[in-house]
Image: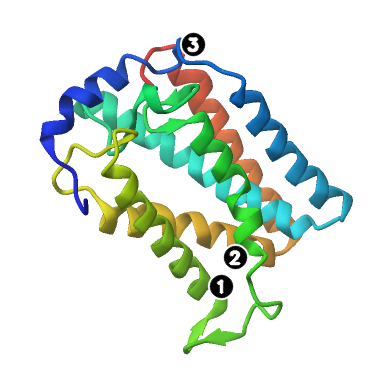
Amino acid sequence: MLFGNEIYKGLADLANNSVRSMENFNWTFIAIFAFVIYVYAVEIKKKNYKAIVAGLSLYSVHWLCEIINAIIGRVSGYALWTVSAESTSYVLLIGVSWELSMMFAVAGIITSKFLLKDKNAKILGINNRWFFAIANALMFSLVEIFLAATPAFIWVYPWWGAIPVFITVYIPFFLAAFIVPDKSPKFQKIFLTSIISLNIILLATLIPLGII
């Protein structure tokens, strides 16, 4: 399914009522979290700080996108993307489940390992950071087409789908993961501190207000 369909609004309404419900909680929550901690622990022990920055950069952008998606859902009635409660142990925000978020927590680390050591090297005439960002964004968008065809993931807007998510969501995810680690330590600290602080402020403000 390349684009959303308004026939799924009923499913989206049900999902919206299950945000942060404990009804489907199970122990996979703990197991997946332990796996993510292990991945970061390995990179920290190796002192592979570029991989850690890649992981945190993607993850912080992921959270900003999810917050924006939840705000859109509150303002317009429906989010751009929605996860169903039946497909997860816990719905964090309307568009992100615990399992999905934990995958994005390590996605930057995993995909950055395929980058060329030379940040200026080109592939097919394209800087390799941009090449891999576009390639990974395309791959994730194709996976999202499959997910949108299942009951787990819901698109309701006819104009939203694989193409806009590829451009506005996944390319920024992977550009952050692949470009920020090549920057100076000062830039890395400013980038991560700024976006993580913004996410925390938004979550701490909007969740108690019942907006997201």
Front position among marks 1 and 2:
1
Which residue occupies 43% across, 33% down? 96
Which residue occupies 63% across, 33% down? 32
The answer to which quarter of the image holds residue 117 is bottom right
**Which image quadrant: the C terminus?**
top left
Question: What type is the residue that disc 2 sits on?
Answer: Ile
Labels 2 and 3 touching (C-beta < 8 A): no
Residue located farthest toward the bottom when viewing the structure as drawn: 125
Number of other residues with Cα within 10 Å of mark 2, as a class: few under 14, some 14 to 19, many 20 or more: some
Disc number for residue 129: 1
Foreground of the two, 32 or 64: 32
For label 3, the SS is loop
Number of other residues with Cα within 10 Å of mark 3, as a class: few under 14, some 14 to 19, many 20 or more: few
Indicate left or right for 37 with 15 as reference: right
Front position among marks 3 and 1:
3
Where is 136 relative to 204, above or below? below
For label 2, the SS is helix
Foreground of the two, 210 or 132: 132
The answer to which quarter of the image holds residue 75 is top left
Indicate left or right for 118 with 85 as reference: right
Which residue occupies 52% across, 29% down? 98
Front position among marks 2 and 3:
3
The alpha-carbon separation of the residues under discs 1 and 2 comes to: 7 Å
Where is mark 3, residue-wise?
22
Mark 2 or mark 3: name the one nearer the start of the chain. Answer: 3
Labels 1 and 2 touching (C-beta < 8 A): yes
The alpha-carbon separation of the residues under discs 2 and 3 comes to: 38 Å
In the rendered image, residue 173, in percent from the top left (x then y), is placed at: 49, 54
Where is mark 2, residue-wise?
179
Mark 1 or mark 2: name the one nearer the start of the chain. Answer: 1
